[in-house]
Amino acid sequence: MIDKRSEQINAIQNQLNTLKDHELGELAHILSLYQDQTVSEDHPSAVPMHFLGRFLGITQNQDGTSEMKLGLQNANTYGVAQGGAIYTLADVAIGFSILQDVEEGQKVLTLELKVNFIEKGKGSRLIASPIILRRGRSTVVSECTVTDEQGNLVAKALGTFYITSSRKAREEETS
C-alpha cells in the first residue's frame, strides 16, 4: 500500500510534468524561499514564520528587524514590491516584535494597520524596523519603518495590535 507522502509526491510530479519551462523556473524560485526559512539553532526561541510570510520571502532577524527578499513572489506588474507585500512585511515585523514580550499562551492580533507608501520597493530586499510606541495591558500601538538596502524610506506603518489573555492570566483573574 502506498502511503500518503508517496501519493502526494506522485501527484506533485504529475503536475510538474504539465508545467512550461518558465513556470518551472517560478516554482523553483518559490521552493528556494522555503529552503531559506529554517529556524536557526542560535535563535531557537524564534516563532516560526507562517505560510504567507514564507511565501513572500520574509525572515526575522535577531536584531528585531524583519526583511523580505524581493523577487517574483512579491513583485507587482511593474517589477517593484507590491503594496500588499510591503503591508504584510510591516504587519509581520510588528507582530513578531510584540511576540517577544508576551506570556505563554497569549496571541497577537492586528486590530488596525495603516501604511503610507513613500517610494518604490526595489533592490534585492526590504528591511522592516518596528518600534513599540505604547504597550497597554491588552493593546499595543506600534510603528514600523520599511527601507530598502540603501536606507531609503519605502513605507511607514502605524498600527494597533491586540494581545489575547493567556490561560494563566484568566485563571488568576477568576480566583
Image (cartoon, rainbow, N blue to C red):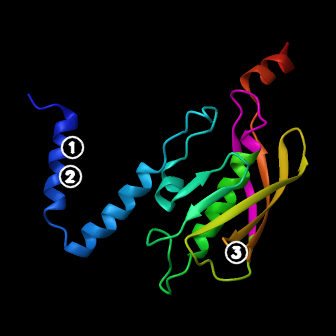
Q: Which of marks 1 and 3 is nearer the N terminus?
A: 1
> Mark 1 packing: few (<14 Cα in 10 Å), some, or many (20+)?
few
Residue that label 1 marks: 8
* Image position of 84 (left or right of 119): left
Q: Name the one closer to the observer, 29 or 110.
A: 29
Vertical arrangement, residue 150 with respect to residue 52, above or below: below
Foreground: disc 1 or disc 3:
3
Q: Please, which residue is most extreme toward the left here? A: 1
Do callouts 2 and 1 mark residues in contact (Cβ within 8 Å)?
yes
Tell me the magenta residue range.
98-114
Which residue is painted at 18% across and 60% down in the image? 16
Report which residue position mark 2 lands on: 12
Disc ID at residue 150: 3
- The disc labelled 3 sits on which kind of residue? Gln
* Callout 2 amino acid: Ile
The x, y position of residue 73, in whole percent, is: 45, 68
Task: Report the residue at 79% width, 23% height from top.
Answer: 170
